[in-house]
Every structure is written in structure tokens, then in C-alpha cells.
Image (cartoon, helix red, strand yellow):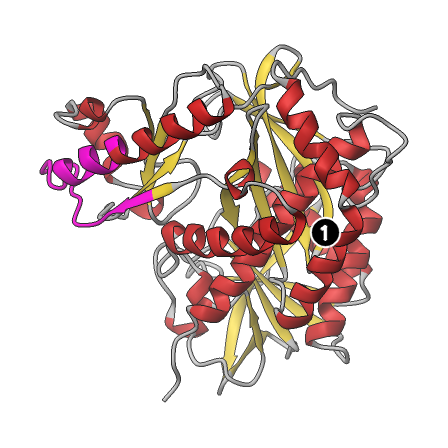
């Protein structure tokens, strides 16, 4: 059963979805050419927002942690896509080591690790889970609420290769986003694949760099199929030298917020949109929905109170925020069971393998849903995001999901280019 989507402003988005359907051949041809030139990340997830007149990504995660939220019906797609990725990287592989986040009590995350290990195992690989936790000095079995057992093993470094006791893998797959930096044990692994590469971690990656690459990718895509790139791309600005505790950077924030709101108002007038524009200010690095605020007027970022400053000052691992991205806000007009919702699309290699709705009945349509009160509803589509049905209406489930898949793949392609262009020079 497909979740019921309630879309208040269906008309304009229906027109955009119709353009995607009418140009599906050109779209898929364009993507094939792009993937010929760029190697896709092993996996990724994209948070989308459907405003009725606009469908755009608002976050691109290279270390997705919600495979447990996918409907089990997607497992064959996941296994096929993972098999393609493995064949591309290590065609003769028999072993892989998966390195998760340093969680031993977060049941939801550990269920994600179990699901990911299961997917990799079904490709024909022997999967070991290597932990970065110093207290893991021997094989340690965790029993999940689902009854599944996970065995964490200490990592073993031998020269320029990494594995676990008795296992020398072809590849090491990170499901740890390296927010706290790169452990020495992961450095200099020149003789095996480390995926994603170290510079894709949040210690180095910046959302603003991804946004700039995404703009370029979308500009080319929009020219190829004949749409306004703004329809699938959120505008953005950047401020550095920010210190929320010391109120440093407030002038930059206020200026850039006002500048971006002015530009968005102009686009709203062009399209006859009566909604009030807003922007989202968030840390330029990091995840878990931390360091995020919605702003509708530049005055709101001047003179923040202590609670607001504390909320914005640090992100995951207690890291101080010094750079922020100001991103055009995209409302969501989708609901599930009356609660505000946004789709999250999962990909492996360059294939869409499933998704789910992030639902939050405590938040409004212009707020960050990755916050307390959120829950996940799996998307049990009858067909995958890659199989539109032109005989149905544009907002029929397979067609709306196809539109989701197109925009999500644009973000994945931008991530691929981003990883290529930010790769550190080797001596």
C-alpha cells in the first residue's frame, strides 16, 4: 500500500512532474552520460522537500544510517545495487569490513547496521563489523531488540591495510561520518578501497560546497530538458567566522539572510506564489539535524537569546560551529496521517533503492523535521522510483516517486562531482 500524499498546491508540481514524464527518455540518457564520466558514491540518502511548486533536496548524506527504515520489499533492489557497486570496485572481493558509528546502545542505529550487513552479505560477501571504540578489544556480541545478533570486532592494522582478526578485506565501508575527525588507524590505507573516501567525512566536507556543485549540475540538467533550474534547486548563501556564543558574525548572517530572502521573493512573484518566503540557517558541516533554525526576517538572527545561541553553537560530537549555510527554505505540502512529512530517498551505486517518509507531528511545514517527535514511515511503492507510468496522472504513486528519484539522483551526482573535486592532492 502506498501512503496517501496530501498535496495542497498540486497544480504547479503536477506540471513539473509532467515535464519529467514527457522527457524521461532524455533524462535517463543524460544520467547515463553523467555516470559514464563520474563514479557514483557507494551509497547515499537525500532529504527532499515538495513545496507544490518546487521539488528540491535539502540535505545529502554520504553515510546513510536508516537502512532499517526501508520497507523489506526493497531488499532485492538494495542487493542488486550493492552488487553493482562491489563489482565496480572489487570484482574479486570475498570480504568486506563495515565500520559503524561509535554507538552500542542506539538500537535504531544498530538495526541500520544489521540491515546494511545483511544487504552486503546477500551480495556474496563475508561481512565483518570493525569498531573504532577503544573498549572493543575482542569480539563483542550485541543482541538487538529485534533478536538479531551483531558482532563487533576490534580493527587490526597491518601496514597499509585494515581488517579484523583473520580477515583481510578488499574494501572497508564507512558508515561512520567522521564528525570528530579521522582516527590514525584509517589514514594511509593505500592498498585497499576505503569508501566513502576520508575527505567525504564531516570533518572536511561542507554543505555549501555540495550546494555549489549541485547548482552547476542542475544548470546543465535544466538546459538539457528545458526547465527553470530553480524548480529543483534551493538557492543559498554562506557565512564564515561565526561564533554564536560570542555573537560574532551576526552582521554577515543578517546581510546574507536579507539578500537571499530578497531573491526568493522575486522568484515567488515570478511564479505567483503567495506563501511567505523563509530561509534555513544551519551548520555548514554535520548531521543529525543539529544546528538548524528557520528564519523569515533578517532581524531574527541578530541578538539571539542564550537558548538559541546554545542550540546553534555546537553540532554532533560537540564540535563548535564556525561556518553556516543559509539555504532557501522549501516548504513541504506532504502529510502522512495528518502529520507533516518529507520523503527521504536511499541510493546505492547510481540506483534508487527505496525510501521512507520522515514524519513529525510537532513541527510545521516550514520547519526542520529531523527533530524530537519524528518517526519514519516506509514507502512501500508498488514500483521503484525508476519506473514511471505515463498512462497515469503525474501525481500517481510511481510518477511522483519517479520525480523523487530524478531529483535525488541529481543530488547524488553532485556528491560524486564534489568528492572528485575535493580530493586532496597526494605528494
Residue 75 drawn at (x, y percent): 80, 47
Q: Is residue 212 above or below residue 370?
A: below
What residue is shown at x 64% (from left), y 54% (from top)?
Answer: 224
Give the residue pinned by disc 1.
27
Tell me the element at label 1: helix
Q: Is residue 296 above or below residue 356?
A: above
Say whether residue 137 is visible: no
Residues packed near mark 1 inside 10 Å, few (<14), some (14 to 19) or many (20 plus): some
Q: Position of residue 135 (x, y in %)?
A: 43, 58
Please say whether residue 220 is one of the residues in the magenta stretch: no
| 243 falls in the magenta region | yes
**Image quadrant containing the N terminus:** top right
In the picture, residue 327 is in which quadrant?
top left
Describe residue 124's horizontal placement relative to residue 27 as left or right: right
- Locate the C terminus by quadrant: bottom left
In the picture provided, is 275 more to the left or to the right than 375?
left
Closer-to-camera residue (76/219)? 219
Q: Is residue 88 above or below residue 17?
A: below
Of the pair 272 and 138, the residue shown nearer to us: 272
Rendering coords of residue 360 (x, y %): 53, 20
**Residue 272: x, y in percent?**
49, 19
Magenta part of the chain: 237-258
Amino acid at each position: 500500500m502506498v501512503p496517501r500524499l496530501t498535496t495542497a498546491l498540486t497544480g504547479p508540481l503536477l506540471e513539473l512532474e509532467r515535464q519529467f514524464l514527457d522527457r524521461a527518455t532524455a533524462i535517463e540518457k543524460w544520467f547515463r552520460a553523467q555516470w559514464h564520466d563520474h563514479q557514483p558514491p557507494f551509497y547515499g540518502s537525500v532529504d527532499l522537500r515538495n513545496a507544490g511548486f518546487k521539488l528540491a533536496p535539502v540535505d545529502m548524506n554520504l553515510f546513510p544510517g536508516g537502512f532499517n527504515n526501508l520497507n523489506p520489499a526493497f531488499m532485492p533492489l538494495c542487493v542488486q545495487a550493492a552488487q553493482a557497486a562491489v563489482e565496480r570496485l572489487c570484482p574479486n572481493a570475498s570480504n568486506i569490513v563495515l565500520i559503524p558509528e561509535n554507538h552500542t546502545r542506539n538500537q535504531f542505529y544498530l538495526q541500520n547496521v544489521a540491515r546494511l550487513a545483511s544487504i552486503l552479505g546477500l551480495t556474496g560477501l563475508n561481512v565483518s563489523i570493525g569498531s573504532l571504540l577503544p573498549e572493543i578489544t575482542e569480539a563483542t556480541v550485541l543482541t538487538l531488540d529485534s533478536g538479531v545478533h551483531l558482532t563487533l570486532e576490534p580493527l587490526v592494522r597491518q601496514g597499509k591495510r585494515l581488517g579484523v582478526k583473520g580477515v583481510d578485506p578488499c574494501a572497508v565501508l564507512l558508515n561512520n561520518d567522521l564528525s570528530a575527525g579521522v582516527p590514525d588507524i584509517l589514514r594511509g590505507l593505500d592498498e585497499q578501497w576505503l569508501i566513502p573516501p576520508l575527505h567525504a567525512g564531516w570533518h572536511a566536507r561542507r554543505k555549501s560546497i555540495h550546494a555549489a556543485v549541485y547548482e552547476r549540475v542542475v544548470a546543465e540538467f535544466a538546459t538539457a530538458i528545458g526547465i527553470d533550474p530553480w524548480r529543483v534547486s534551493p538557492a543559498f548563501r554562506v557565512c564564515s567566522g561565526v561564533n554564536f556564543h560570542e555573537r560574532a558574525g551576526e552582521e554577515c548572517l543578517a546581510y546574507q539572510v536579507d539578500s537571499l530572502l530578497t531573491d526568493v521573493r522575486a522568484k515567488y512573484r515570478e511564479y505567483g506564489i503567495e506563501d511567505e518566503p523563509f530561509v534555513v540557517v544551519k551548520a555548514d558541516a554535520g548531521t543529525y539535524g543539529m544546528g538548524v533554525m528557520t528564519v523569515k526576517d533578517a532581524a531574527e538572527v541578530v541578538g539571539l537569546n542564550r537558548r538559541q545561541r546554545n542550540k546553534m553553537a555546537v553540532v554532533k560530537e560537540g564540535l563548535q560551529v564556525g561556518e553556516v549555510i543559509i539555504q532557501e527554505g522549501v516548504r513541504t505540502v506532504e502529510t502522512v496521517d495528518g502529520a507533516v512529512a518529507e520523503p527521504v530517498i536511499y541510493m546505492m551505486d547510481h540506483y534508487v533503492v527505496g525510501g521512507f517518509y520522515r514524519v513529525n507531528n510537532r513541527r510545521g511545514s516550514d520547519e526542520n523535521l529531523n527533530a524530537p517527535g519524528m518517526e519514519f514511515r516506509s514507502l512501500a511503492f508498488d514500483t521503484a522510483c525508476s519506473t514511471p507510468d505515463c498512462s497515469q496522472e503525474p501525481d500517481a504513486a510511481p510518477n511522483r516517486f519517479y520525480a523523487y528519484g530524478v531529483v535525488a539522483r541529481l543530488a547524488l551526482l553532485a556528491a560524486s562531482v564534489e568528492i572528485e573535486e575535493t580530493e586532496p592532492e597526494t605528494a
